[in-house]
Image (tube, helix red, strand yellow):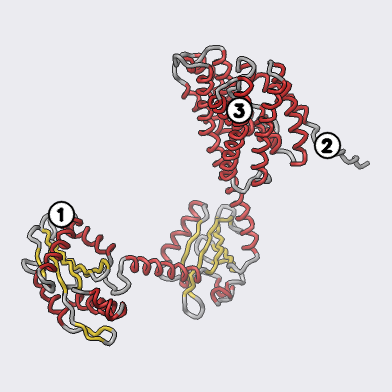
Amino acid sequence: MPRPPTPPRRCWADAPLLAILVAGSAWLSLTLARGPGELSGIWIGSGLLAGWLLSRPTRRWPGYVAATLAADAGARLLVGDAPGYALVIASCNATEALLLAGIVRRHVPDVRAPKDWMAMGGLATAATLLACAVSGTAAAAVAHLLHGQDFRMALLGWYAAHVVGMVIVATTTLVMQRGGLGLFLEKGRRGSLVATMALLVAVAVTVFLTSLPLLFLAYPPLLLVATRHDFAGVALGVIVLGLVGGIATHLGHGPLWLQEGLDDHGRIALLQIFLAGGCLMTIPMCLATAERNRLTRHLADSERRYRMLADHSHDVIARIRADGERLYVSPSVAELLGWQPAQMLGSRWDLMHPDDRPRQQQAMAEVLDTGHPRTDVYRLRHRDGHYVWVEAVARCLPADDDANALDVMLSVRDITRRKEAEEALAESRRELERMSRTDPLTGLANRRQLDERLAQALARLGRGGPPVALLYLDVDHFKQVNDSLGHAAGDALLRELARRLRESVRVTDLVARPGGDEFVLMLEDPGPAGAETVARKVLEATQVPIEAEGTTLVVGTSIGIACARRPVESASLMARADAALYVAKRAGRNRYHVDAGG
């Protein structure tokens, strides 16, 4: 007989269990806090509720919140809190968990399989900090009004306790709710979990029973637990450190008592910092591991889908023996290369481009030798004579006629368009690089190229290279040309002047336009009077009338010359040439002046 359908669970059938856990943890935390009205060093209940809510449908949340509120308030009454205070603080705790769960649920509907683990970790961290700040402000205000506690100290104590507790316990609760005890008792990992946790407990007990500052020794076994068991290990490990550290410190043992004059609040703060450090080391690592595993699974799924599509695509499938003889070629080869499958059988290395043939023969030998698949790109000759770029994935498989021999299976696809696009992109990059080093108006070198070439020339000078000369020049009264004839005429003038400057120097010399009407000539090994000779040629060249937008112009130019025969900073050499230029201008323009230094 068919089994009757399982009756639906009540919306909050497990609310009593949550209430028991919250009440027990609240009673324990408040007891360790030493006295009614005090704020606990580490608060567990809000994390329990937040993790519980995130693992349940939203429609069940009211029942869990009500059960937790009652349990929390009851525990506070047991330790001696006033009814009003107990109810308000319990409400702050419930609001904190509800706010955190609401923010995360809104942005990550399924916390079991988020689209990005690292993004979820950042969101959960931000939501935790915000929720604890909101609840802490309200709780500190109540503690100040009803018990006279310092508002700032109460807020800091609440905030630290709840942030640490939320990070630890909410993570633990989510892990338990997602995988149950199987995460801890799963066959094959039980022994490892027991061993690593035993090591952590032993180290933690040793650290907190000594009077030496050895807290850092507890972190390596915590990292080991996190590495072996992910979030489950982090949750258990930090809880163990919190329990051992809290109990030992409460009983007056451990390194937290080494600081003289430190009160209970100070020791609680140090314990919180210690546990927060453990969380900061392990939780981001686990988030990164979870994200890596998610991406790995996604990649594996993509590969499976790719294989399914490849089996039904137009890619060419070929089977080749170890000696290079083709045993099978799929019909799609006719579309790719124009050859019929029967024409492709046998040894046809002649179809491969001569430049690619030796490399591909070696690649095939490596595949057969290692058994590892590999992907290669090469050219195959089309029947009409041109070459086609292909991408071929080579894999080994057992030979049909010899179980001890291997064949190679090739999956070949046409990537000619991709190669053309890559070449076009490379050419575009080269063009962009050229444009980034060239003045767009004149085609001369720009400031960037000038700085690079000058730095290289001065570096060679420091290694015994030839002297370097800089000629700084600009057009006399160029602004009047722009103002009277317009910028088009000014641009035409600059282009013509650039052409004449190129004709006035050697091919190995550099002509640059840093900007405006300024030009720079850089000469390497100019000779005894080479720089002045070039300056005179430039002055003569500029005296020839220039046609600019239908107007004949005669312009002059002023030139400043600076030479370097010993190592010098490029900025210093440029400054000397620039200063010499202004000397030439003050002397009447349309002339050159040589800097006396160098």
Query: Alpha-carbon distance for marks 2 and 1?
Result: 85 Å
Tell me which numbered mark, 2 or 3, is placed earlier along the sequence: 2
Of the two numbered discs 2 and 1 in the rendering, the one whose residue sits closer to the viewer: 1
- Give, as a three-letter code, the residue at label 1: Val
* Image point (45%, 62%), residue name: 361
Mark 2 lies on residue: 9
Mark 1 lies on residue: 568
- In the figure, 429 relative to 383: above or below? above
Residue 141's tag is 3
Q: Position of residue 181 (x, y in %)?
A: 69, 30
| In front of the other: 330 or 496 | 496
Residue 519's tag is none
Within 10 Å of the Cα at label 2, are there few (<14), some (14-19), or many (20+) other Cα atoms? few
- Give, as a three-letter code, the residue at label 2: Arg
Query: Alpha-carbon distance for marks 3 and 1?
Result: 68 Å
Q: Position of residue 544 (x, y in %)?
A: 16, 83
- Give, as a three-letter code, the residue at label 3: Ala
Query: Helix, strand or loop at disc 3?
Result: helix
Query: Alpha-carbon distance for marks 2 and 3?
Result: 40 Å
* Image point (70%, 38%), residue name: 55
Left or right of 451 in this view: 121: right
Tell me which numbered mark, 3 or 1, is placed earlier along the sequence: 3
Image marks 2 and 1: residues in contact by CB distance under 8 Å: no
Tell me which numbered mark, 2 or 1, is placed earlier along the sequence: 2
| In front of the other: 295 or 135 | 135
| In front of the other: 584 or 423 | 584
Is residue 370 at all visible to an observer of this figure? Answer: yes
